[in-house]
């Protein structure tokens, strides 16, 4: 079974731009979560989607948003990029009702 | 609130040495506990997990036991290899309002194994 895939793997943007990252979960997994990883803050939870609905949100500004499609694929969007948004963005999927999350390889975003 | 504390790294060992990475947690209720590993330039890989007190998770020679009395989940391996060099994250699954879960991670411990 294919793992979680994320595209693109690397991205360079400038301040003020916006960016969209994509995540395809493991087949059959309907829950998708997003995390931000930075050297200073470590791994922080962004949000979780299930059946196209955001169920849970971390402590991030409204510039960070996401959505989930009917095929469980998910996107996250960051608007008005800031230098501090440079990070590795990780997507994870899980089966409904189960706690174990499986991660993708991440998208590394650099904001200049 | 819920939190995870890991020993600071880096941990530097010679090949075939014994490894312990300490992890303690604070949580309401009875969370599930996980160890994830991150190799350079990659995402997180699930290493092992335990879902209730006294459970032992194991995988690839790594082990960790869920100790409720000491709120700990220390990672051990009897004989490390150079290929084990990576960053190791301890995490708990925190049940939030609505009955859903999110992972709360420790800061990570970098392990460097040299020949």
Image (tube, rainbow, N blue to C red):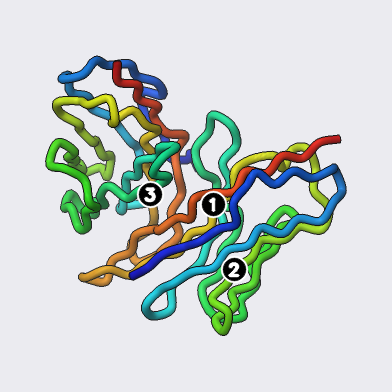
Q: Residue B115 placed where, x, y %?
A: 86, 35
Distance from label 1 to label 3 (Cα)? 18 Å
- Numbered badge on residue B73: 2
On screen, residue B30 above or below A89 = below
Badge 1 density bin: few <14, some 14–19, many ≥20, Cα 10 Å = many
Q: Which mark is residue A74?
A: none
The residue that label 3 is drawn on is A93
Residue placed at 54% from the left, 81% from the top? Answer: B68
Could you say which is closer to the camera, residue B77 or residue A22?
Answer: B77
Compared across the picture, whether A26 is left or right of B69 comes to: left
Label 1 – label 2 distance at C-alpha: 11 Å
Q: Chain of mark 1?
A: B
Where disc 1 sits, the SS reads strand
Q: Mark 1 = which residue?
A: B89
The answer, for residue A27, to whether it is visible in the render is: no
Sequence-earlier tag: 1 or 2: 2
Q: Residue A18 appears at what percent x and percent y? A: 17, 23
Q: Residue A11 is drawn in which quadrant?
A: top left
User: At 29% from the left edge and 30% from the top edge, which residue is drawn?
Assistant: A84
């Amino acid at each position: 079974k294919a793992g979680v895939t994320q595209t693109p793997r690397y991205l360079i943007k400038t301040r003020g731009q916006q960016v969209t990252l994509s995540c395809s979960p493991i087949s059959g997994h309907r829950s998708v979560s997003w995390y931000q990883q930075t050297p200073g803050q470590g791994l922080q939870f962004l949000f979780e989607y299930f059946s196209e609905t955001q169920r849970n949100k971390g402590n991030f500004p409204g510039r960070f948003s996401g959505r989930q499609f009917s095929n469980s694929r998910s996107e996250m969007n960051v608007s008005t990029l800031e230098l501090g948004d440079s990070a590795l963005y990780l997507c994870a999927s899980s089966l409904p009702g189960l706690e174990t999350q499986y991660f993708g390889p991440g998208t590394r975003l650099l904001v200049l | 609130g819920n939190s995870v504390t890991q020993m600071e790294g880096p941990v530097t060992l010679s090949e075939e040495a014994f490894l312990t990475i300490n992890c303690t947690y604070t949580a309401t209720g009875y969370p599930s506990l996980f160890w994830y590993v991150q190799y350079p330039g990659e995402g997180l890989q699930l290493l092992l997990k335990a879902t209730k007190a006294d459970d032992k998770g194991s995988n690839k020679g790594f082990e960790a036991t869920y100790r409720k009395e000491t709120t700990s989940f220390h990672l051990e391996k009897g004989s490390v290899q150079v290929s084990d060099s990576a960053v190791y994250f301890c995490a708990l699954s925190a049940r939030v309002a609505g009955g859903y879960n999110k992972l709360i991670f420790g800061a990570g411990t970098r392990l460097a194994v040299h020949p």
